[in-house]
Each structure stands twice: as structure tokens, then as C-alpha cells.
Amino acid sequence: MSRVCQITGKKAITGNNVSHSKRRTKRKFNVNVFNRKFFWPEQGVWVRLTVTAAGLRNINKMGLDAALKKAAEEGHLTEIRTLQP
């Protein structure tokens, strides 16, 4: 699975390692991604999401239902993995 946040859509970007002599080599800046389970009370199910630290803060601030709706509108949420109760 790729390291992309399902809430914010953040993903890895590329840049350069710059040495003391200013030589540049390519590198990747990965995102701070976690696999977390959330209880979705509106549906009554547990949901497993891949979220960044910023995505966790958005869920805490807006609530899970509002964050999922916003992510679906913006096209970040490809699939929701539900877990059996």
C-alpha cells in the first residue's frame, strides 16, 4: 500500500540531499503515516484508515463523519475498510 493519507491526501515528495560540497542527490520526503482503527458511530462499524498526524488532528477537530465526507468530496478517500463488530 502506498504511503498516502486517506483524509488529507498528503503523499511523499522528492527533493535533494545536499552535501557539504553542494553535490545533490535525489531523496524522498515521506509522510508521517499511521494505520488506525476508528469507531464510526453513524454506521455502527469500525473503520481502518491510513492517516497522517495532520489527518488525526482533523478527525479530532471535525469528527470522523465530517472528515470522511470531506475526504470523499475531495477525492482522497478511495476505499473504506470496515471491520466486523
Image (tube, rainbow, N blue to C red):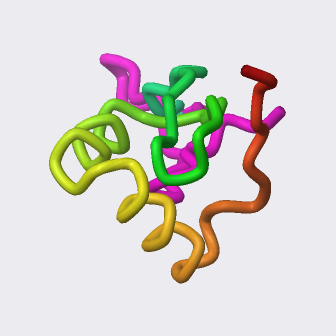
Place of residue 68 in the rendered image (x, y in percent of width and height, measured from the top left): 49, 60
In the image, residue 23 lies in the stretch drawn in magenta: yes
State the residue at coordinates (58%, 32%).
27
Q: Nearer the viewer, residue 32 or 24?
A: 32
Residue that extends furthest to the bottom in the rendered view of this protein: 73
Q: Nearer the viewer, residue 28 or 69?
A: 69
Q: Nearer the viewer, residue 59 or 8?
A: 59
Q: Position of residue 5 (x, y in %)?
A: 55, 45
- Give the vertical position of 63 relative to 37 (above or below): below
Q: Is residue 26 visible?
A: no
What residue is at 54 percent from the left and 21 percent from the top?
36
> Which residues fall within the magenta stretch?
1-28
Compared with 37, 39 (above or below) is below
Q: Quadrant of residue 20?
A: top left
Q: Position of residue 25 (x, y in %)?
A: 59, 32
Q: Nearer the viewer, residue 9 or 67?
A: 67
Horizontal side, residue 79 vs residue 31: left or right? right
On whether residue 3 falls in the magenta region, the answer is yes
Q: How many marks?
A: 0
At horizontal 22% and vertical 56% (from top left) the residue drawn is: 62
At x 62%, y 44%, the residue is 4
Quarter occupied by the N terminus: top right
Look at the magenta stretch and give its main secondary structure: loop
